[in-house]
Image (cartoon, coloured by chain):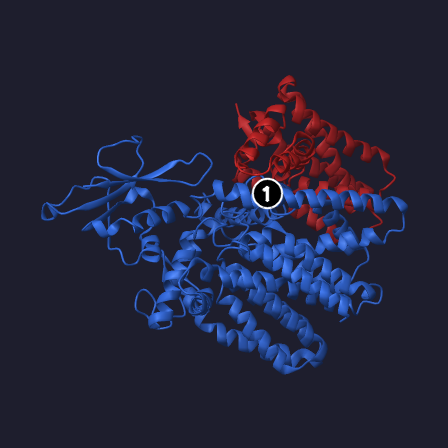
Chain colours: A blue, B red
């Protein structure tokens, strides 16, 4: 690798890291409920070696009505050992994996192109462009900044893919062992990879079986993968393991329950969902409309990418590197499958793997257009470059200025504000009572103020006789009377209107 | 061979009509198909509301009509070529047909000025719909969109199955499957199109 390439890669990693780490404790503006649950389990593992339910080093964590795969929780445990029990520790593994993914993408693209006669002299440049574009892609930045398991799973999976490519060339067995471990880690980190990895393994097995020099390696790897993933597969077949699947299954929406009609309707639901991941309004305008998954009023990709993506499809189908083409098709075909059998669809987090083929398509289109020897091309590229800079600035403005104010409740920042307000007050009261309708899970209190004993009650709660004469801090949502009797504290949201969120009553 | 292709095109057209006829039960597309002066103003107000404390110059540079207009225009225009909308409008076979049409116009049929014209008029109609929606009767514009989208998709399908292509049996098979999927989709989920339009 040339020195200049290394320097540029380092700069991209630094910039990508900055976009992922900078103030990620406050933006997104709070830990959402899954992050809180991860944090509590991770802290228990770190301190006691047991999860919240007393199971020692579990392979699946019981959490919020279903079971979580353990990868990210153990990573956060490690992170908490270094940074302590705080929000940064919860988000650190994701931000780090997101940053390192840029490097892996560079390596994959460079590896795929450097042996193609026509393109090899530009392999480094295309690799750098891919890493650079991924570094500034809203879709990837957004998830890398919060504690999402999918970001780590994607990194590990791509690293596995890179090693598969190496194995394809060198045919060394130890590489396939490492690939198996990486793929397995992805499966134990995010649910979608329970489908993506076996499908990838199957494709690898079919391709490798044809070649006698690779046959031994791929068969060994596949058997190893199946054996090591057996506990996960067995668990997936149990009632507890299927909870998540049934909670999110797209086929639950099927209005037909009998006979062939049901299967045909399932097929149509699957296909509609599958196509939805290629919807241009999903990619460039609205995203999946789950506020936690993207910034309002911007898509998950930049609009300027669209013409280059179309050009990328055109050039890839016409004349380009067959290996890059195969990778893009593989990632699209395999990546959409687990997302399309779940609801809602499209779902940006479950299809996070899709950011890679979309980025590669854009870069390839851009590169091929750059090669066209026409004088007007440079004017177009300059124009698009300007538009890209404006769009990036626009995104940063929305992300750093608007989003923290608009998405407070989606990220649980309201609950964090309540716990912060309680911190200075709870010592003056014998009982702290929280109204259920405030919509803050007990886990929030357990994470932010574990030292405070909380009683969660229904709205119809009355002071029990046994508490007569004792001081009570009663916390409930704001019901419309800013100056109600006995109110000792009002919690305001740090949003645009500084809305009142909750009131503390001294009883 | 040509007769077979013509019959296939006729069948595809009937299948597309089967999906399309449902839309006469509506009276308007959903609001995200429209881009008016008011939309632009509201967008800008929403965008600048949160900019409290930011340097005024930066706020003006990022949120102004000159930038927001083309951006909003492109974003709204994309809605008319969204695969989810097209699947509901003219079925799976129609949506794939339009993708084929764009592909062939960019590759093998670059000099087919008639269909370039159809494509151009489609975009023009989208723009008219975006800006002048209340002044045009819904049924007329629905007929306009129907004719243009179907022309484009039938052109795409025609190019896909015409005689000089390889693997013709496979191609006919794919079109057949898409037709069946379209019919199934309309029969099993007849009301899904209401995601994109307001019902009478």
Percent x, y for residue B189? Answer: 52, 39
Rendered image quadrant of residue A224? bottom right
Left-right relation of A445 to A268: left
Percent x, y for residue A458? Answer: 24, 43
Up the image or down, B35 lies above or below A338; here it is above
Residue pictured at 48% horizontal, 59% vertical: A91
Q: Is residue A192 visible?
A: no
Rendered image quadrant of residue B178? top right
Q: Quadrant of the N terminus of chain A?
A: bottom right
Percent x, y for residue A254? Answer: 47, 45
Label 1 CA crowd tier, 10 Å (few <14, some 14–19, many 20+): many
Residue pictured at 39% horizontal, 45% vertical: A414
* Residue designated by label 1: A397
| Foreground residue among A1 and B89 | A1
What subunit carries mark 1? Answer: A
Q: Secondary structure at mark 1?
A: helix
Q: Quadrant of the C terminus of chain A?
A: top left
Left-right relation of A385 to A463: right
Q: Is residue A94 visible?
A: yes
Percent x, y for residue B1? Answer: 82, 45
- In this rendering, the count of numbered labels is 1
Left-right relation of A332 to A311: left
| Foreground residue among A368 and A398 | A398
């Amino acid at each position: 690798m040339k020195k200049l390439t290394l320097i540029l890669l380092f700069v991209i990693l630094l910039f990508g890291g900055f976009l992922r780490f900078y103030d990620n404790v406050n933006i997104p503006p709070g830990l959402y409920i899954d992050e809180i649950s991860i944090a509590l389990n991770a802290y228990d593992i770190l301190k006691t070696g047991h999860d919240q339910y007393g199971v020692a080093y579990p392979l699946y964590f019981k959490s919020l009505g279903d079971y979580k795969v353990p990868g990210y929780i153990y990573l956060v445990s490690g992170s908490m050992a270094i940074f302590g029990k705080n929000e940064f520790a919860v988000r650190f593994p994701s931000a780090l994996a997101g940053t390192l993914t840029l490097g892996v993408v560079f390596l994959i693209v460079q590896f795929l192109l450097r042996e193609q006669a026509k393109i090899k002299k530009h392999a480094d440049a295309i690799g750098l462009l891919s890493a650079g574009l991924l570094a500034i892609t809203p879709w990837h930045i957004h998830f890398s900044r919060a504690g999402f398991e999918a970001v780590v799973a994607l990194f590990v999976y791509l690293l596995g893919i890179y090693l598969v490519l190496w194995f394809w060339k060198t045919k060394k067995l130890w590489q396939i062992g490492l690939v198996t471990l990486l793929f397995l880690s992805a499966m134990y980190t995010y649910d979608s990879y329970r489908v993506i990895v076996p499908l990838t393994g199957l494709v690898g097995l079919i391709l490798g079986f044809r070649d006698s020099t690779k046959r031994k390696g791929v068969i060994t790897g596949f058997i190893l993968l199946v054996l090591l993933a057996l506990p996960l597969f067995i668990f997936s077949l149990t009632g507890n393991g299927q909870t998540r699947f049934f909670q999110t299954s797209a086929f639950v929406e099927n209005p037909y329950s009998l006979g062939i009609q049901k299967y045909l309707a399932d097929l149509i639901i699957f296909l509609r969902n599958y196509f939805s991941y290629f919807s241009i309004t999903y990619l460039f305008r609205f995203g999946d409309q789950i506020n936690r998954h993207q910034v309002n009023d911007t898509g998950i990709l930049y609009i300027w990418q669209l013409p280059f993506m179309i050009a990328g499809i055109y050039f890839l189908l016409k004349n380009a590197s067959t290996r890059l083409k195969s990778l893009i098709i593989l990632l699209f075909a395999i990546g959409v499958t687990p997302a399309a059998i779940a609801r809602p669809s499209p779902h940006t987090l479950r299809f996070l793997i899709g950011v890679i083929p979309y980025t590669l398509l854009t870069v390839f289109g851009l590169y091929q257009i750059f090669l066209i020897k026409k004088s007007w091309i440079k004017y177009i590229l300059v124009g698009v470059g300007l538009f890209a800079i404006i769009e990036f600035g626009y995104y940063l403005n929305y992300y750093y200025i608007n989003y923290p104010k608009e998405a407070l409740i989606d990220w649980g920042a309201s609950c964090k504000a309540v716990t912060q307000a309680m911190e200075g007050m709870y010592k003056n009261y014998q009982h702290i009572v929280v109204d259920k309708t405030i919509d803050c899970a007990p886990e929030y209190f357990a994470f932010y103020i574990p030292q405070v004993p909380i009683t969660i009650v229904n709205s119809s709660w009355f002071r029990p006789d046994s508490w007569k004469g004792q001081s009570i801090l009663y916390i409930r949502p704001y019901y419309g009377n800013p100056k109600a009797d006995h109110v000792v504290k009002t919690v305001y949201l740090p949003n645009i209107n500084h809305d009142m969120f909750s009131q503390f009553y001294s009883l | 061979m040509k007769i077979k292709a013509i019959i296939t095109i006729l069948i595809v057209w009937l299948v597309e009509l089967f999906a399309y006829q449902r839309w006469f039960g509506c009276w308007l597309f959903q609001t995200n198909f429209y881009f008016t002066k008011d939309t632009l103003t509201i967008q800008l107000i929403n965008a600048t509301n949160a900019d409290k404390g930011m340097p005024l110059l930066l706020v003006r540079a990022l949120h102004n009509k000159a930038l927001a207009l083309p951006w909003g225009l492109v974003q709204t225009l994309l809605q008319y070529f969204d695969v989810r909308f097209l699947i509901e409008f003219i079925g799976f076979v129609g949506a794939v047909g339009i993708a084929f049409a764009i592909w062939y116009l960019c590759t093998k049929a670059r000099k087919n000025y008639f269909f370039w014209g159809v494509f151009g008029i489609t975009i023009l109609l989208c723009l008219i719909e975006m800006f002048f929606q209340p002044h045009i009767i819904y049924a007329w514009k629905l007929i306009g969109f129907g004719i243009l989208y179907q022309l484009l998709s039938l052109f795409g399908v025609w190019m896909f199955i015409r005689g000089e292509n390889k693997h013709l049996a496979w191609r006919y098979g794919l079109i057949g499957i898409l037709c069946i999927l379209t019919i199934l989709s309309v029969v099993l989920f007849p009301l899904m199109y209401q995601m994109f339009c307001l019902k009478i």
